[in-house]
Image (spheres, rainbow, N blue to C red):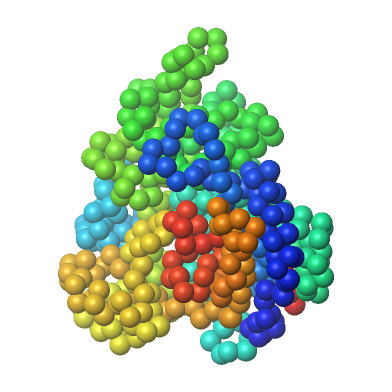
Amino acid sequence: MSSSMVSHWPPTLTDQQREELTLRATTYALSHGLIYLPVADVQPPAPTSAIHAPLALFPSPFPRKQFELAKRLQHAYNVLYARVALDEKFLDRIMGAEVGVGRVDDFTGELWKIWKRLCDEGIQQRLHLGLFRSDYLLHAPEKGGPVSLKQVEFNTISSSFGTLSQNIANLHRHLAASTEYFNSSPFLKLQNLPPNETIAGLAEGLATAHKAYESPSAWIMFVVQAGERNVFDQRWLEYELLEKHSIHIVRQTLDELATSAEVVPGSRILRVKLPGLLPRGAESVEISTVYFRAGYTPRDYPTHAHYQTRYVLESSVAIKCPSVQLQLAGGKKVQEVLTQRDVAFQFGEDIEVNLLRSSWMGMWGLDENGDYGVHKAREQAHKLVLKPQREGGGNNVYKEDIPGFLDALPVSEREAWIAMELIETPDLGNYLVRAGSGTEGAVKTEVVSELGIFGYALFGPGRPVEEKEVGWLLRTKGKESNEGGVAAGFSVLDSLVLVD
């Protein structure tokens, strides 16, 4: 596929056709759980209303070969990051609070201190679970020329929108089946709209960890943010785990866990108190797996007590998804160091490192060789993005904002930032639909689409990595927007139409 093949996307519609597709899309979304909680100062304990998630009216074109490549790459990335997390010397050197990023980034430093405290106490994780997502953009440096697949980042914690990505794929398949998109494009055939079974895949990863814990009566715990608007993306996993795997779920915030979580002395079993909420008069439940959908941002730890709660969870024998060291392995500095010459090869000859390298853009640390890293970033600012050790969107610095940012950045904080060459995406358009805009609210705009591939890995010291690729996500945003988070308000949910 060349970048010009689908440059006239989206297909042309009449106003009547656009309004009909928008009505069908929004009602399907509301009927099938493709929803958010509405904006509110304080979310009520029980939802009383919902809005459809922001969505693309058409699926976005994506080259079939690059899609298959992204799925193949996920297996290599699953193994690579599992081994990075287990390489304590490597992780300590890159992310540590004594010689690495943790010295200059307080959040990273606090996570590292939890890990080191556990090590000093002789507490090691028997098993780790990663529910990963590797994100990519198509790279088309020559207008109308061939495209390649380039990685944006690799996520090791709270890799969201897996379940809603399945629902949006189903939505687009429904529109194709019910309207044939009014014969507006020869690409829009069901055989070109790949099915997505991310709900079953991610639930399988959690269920695999639960089974490995070897206590069938235990529960899985979701650690969540208070007032979470994207709650339904999590609830679909809960329903799948109960209905298909007979595994019960408990949801708790870090604030709640400060009083409800208890690690039993000796056995280090994690129990969560739920008085009055359990059958047969039980007061607490044993936890097999701790799934973090919170804890990836400093905002989740407003006091030192919140880090202490994270330590309590990490000190138990429950399998963490992710463990604190696996969360550290997902740092942007680790991503940058892995691109350096021969570094990735040290994690095993069985990993397709050369294939991985083909997906990497140029990266370097701002602390590289004294002032050289900053000087290079200043010279090439027009084609760069600067990234800190953060997740969740809205943290990066782009292009023309870089020189001023570098002027204000203390020398001591350079180590916490990396520079990355921007991926030059092909021209594309779509109709973006946000809640409250009505049937006339499908806005046509130039867009960029980012593909995420989900995978899980269960691993531990001396144990082969058990891993699988389990689905995909497409997020689409206006081309004028630098950031890509759906929850942060920058993107809409989308799916793929594969083209050759």
Drawn side of residue 40 relative to residue 408, left or right = right
**Which quadrant is home to the C terminus?**
bottom right
Q: Residue at x 29, y 54 (%)?
A: 108
- Residue 31 visible? The answer is yes
Q: Residue at x 72, y 75 (%)?
A: 12
Residue 306 in picture, x, y percent from top left: 29, 38
Q: Residue at x 28, y 83 (%)?
A: 378
| Picture quadrant of residue 143 | bottom right
Drawn side of residue 348 relative to residue 367, left or right = right
Residue 301 in picture, x, y percent from top left: 30, 43
Residue 219 vs residue 275, the one in the foreground: 275
Q: Residue at x 34, y 38 (%)?
A: 310
Residue 140 in picture, x, y percent from top left: 57, 83
Residue 3 in picture, x, y percent from top left: 63, 83
| Picture quadrant of residue 240 | top right
Q: Is residue 363 above or below residue 44?
A: below
Q: How many marks?
A: 0
**Which quadrant is home to the N terminus?**
bottom right
- Residue 315 visible? The answer is no
Residue closest to the far top = 281
